[in-house]
């Protein structure tokens, strides 16, 4: 196993860990913010279902991510390694500011920037949609763009239905709502694992294929286990910053609102995972929290300055990570 493959592999695991800092924390944000569970309890839930998601739901997302770049095997380590380095750096910056940025966007931007630096436009699989399945860069960007509005709309509709039928609810509704939050947080963590852990699995599979370690893009089971474990470790080590932003800084959600937000997010991400569509759990969950505020007719309670900062981060993620990856690629070549 050559040194370039080892470095790129380590960066892929680091990406999964920083993904846990950002995206995985979103799956338990409402559960913790509404005090339906302690942080430790929520991390246990995320750990179990983040692991089950990629193991049980297939590798459709991994295949989509693994096919974004079209470079020669000899350049794969450099391109993917530079793309991952840029994505990890961006994830750390976003996490340090408590912004629910998109790890998926950072990875796509990094891979595209490095591939363009190596081989120009022909080194990128631009793709689009193949039936209902996204392919390449454009297919991934379409799924990333569509999923947040769906999360917001879904949460808005769910909270309005719940409020309509539960407007006379008493304290007796408390235990069922908390139970529902646990169930939906588990479903969201499962969906997140199936979607986000597979992003790291996809790039590792591409690395192994290019280096002759495997014969297809189907990753060995140990790769899935390593990526899921790294994702969980990231959630445990750094998740609180994002939990605080999603659960309190965007809109201070109550238990029934947390249930609506988590249910809508889980549905969107689960559906995307089945279709092989990479999504951003951060973007979907954050958008669903805004949707809950609208569903309660409390737009003025939404902290729009935080939303503006998140929106700005989402807009600049692709160009910034692309430029970083191009620079990382040149540095990689110079060092080797």
Image: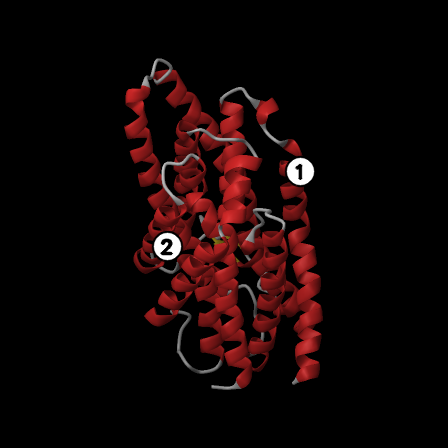
Note whether 235 is above or below 293 in the view shown: below
Task: Report x, y in % for residue 87.
Answer: 59, 62
Residue at 48% of width from left, 37% of height from top?
A: 151
Task: Report x, y in % for residue 332.
Answer: 66, 78
Q: Which mark is residue 30?
A: none
Q: Which mark is residue 308?
A: 1
Q: Secondary structure at mark 2?
A: helix
Quadrant of the rendered image containing residue 175: top left
Of residues 119 and 293, which is closer to you in this image?
A: 293
> In the rendered view, does 99 fall on the left or right side of 17?
right
Task: Report x, y in % for residue 251.
Answer: 54, 31
> In the rendered view, does 171 fall on the left or right side of 325?
left
Tell me the distance, in whole angstroms, between the alpha carbons under discs 1 and 2. 29 Å
Q: Residue 242, can we see it?
A: yes
Residue at 33% of width from left, 29% of height from top?
A: 177
Of residues 308 and 161, which is closer to you in this image?
A: 308
**Which callout, 1 or 2, points at the residue further toward the start of the chain?**
2
Task: Please state the total of marks drawn on the protein image.
Answer: 2
Residue at 71% of width from left, 82% of height from top?
A: 334
Task: Report x, y in % for residue 48.
Answer: 32, 54
Note whether 321 is above or below 152 in the view shown: below
Residue pointed to by mark 2: 50
> In the rendered view, does 107 fall on the left or right side of 20?
right
Q: How is the image coloured?
A: secondary structure
Q: Residue 280, can we see it?
A: no
């Amino acid at each position: 196993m050559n040194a370039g493959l080892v470095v790129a592999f380590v960066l892929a695991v680091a990406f999964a860990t920083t993904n846990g800092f950002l995206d995985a924390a979103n799956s338990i944000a409402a559960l913790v913010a509404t005090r339906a569970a302690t942080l430790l309890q929520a991390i246990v839930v995320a750990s179990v279902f983040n692991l089950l998601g990629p193991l049980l739901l297939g590798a459709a997302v991994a295949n989509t991510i693994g096919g974004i770049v079209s470079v020669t095997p000899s350049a794969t380590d450099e391109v993917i390694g530079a793309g991952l380095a840029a994505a990890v750096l961006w994830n750390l910056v976003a996490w340090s500011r408590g912004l629910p940025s998109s790890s998926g966007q950072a990875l796509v931007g990094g891979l595209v920037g490095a591939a363009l630096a190596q081989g120009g436009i022909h080194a990128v699989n631009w793709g689009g949609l193949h039936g209902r399945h996204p392919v390449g860069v454009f297919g991934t960007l379409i799924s990333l763009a569509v999923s947040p509005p769906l999360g917001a709309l879904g949460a808005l509709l769910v909270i309005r239905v719940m409020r309509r039928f539960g407007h006379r609810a008493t304290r007796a509704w408390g235990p069922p709502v908390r139970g529902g939050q646990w169930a939906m947080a588990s479903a969201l963590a499962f969906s997140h694992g199936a979607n986000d852990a597979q992003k790291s699995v996809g790039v590792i599979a591409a690395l192994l294929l290019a280096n002759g370690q495997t014969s297809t893009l189907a990753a060995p089971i140990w790769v899935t286990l390593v990526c899921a474990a790294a994702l969980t470790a990231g959630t445990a080590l750094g998740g609180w910053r994002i939990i605080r932003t999603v659960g309190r800084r965007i809109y201070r959600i109550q238990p029934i609102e947390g249930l609506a937000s988590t249910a809508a997010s889980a549905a969107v991400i689960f559906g995307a995972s089945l279709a092989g569509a990479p999504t951003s759990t951060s973007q979907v969950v954050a958008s669903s929290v805004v949707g809950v505020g609208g569903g309660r007719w409390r737009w003025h309670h939404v902290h729009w300055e935080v939303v503006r900062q998140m929106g700005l981060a989402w807009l600049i993620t692709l160009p910034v990570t692309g430029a970083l990856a191009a620079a990382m690629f040149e540095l990689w070549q110079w060092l080797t």
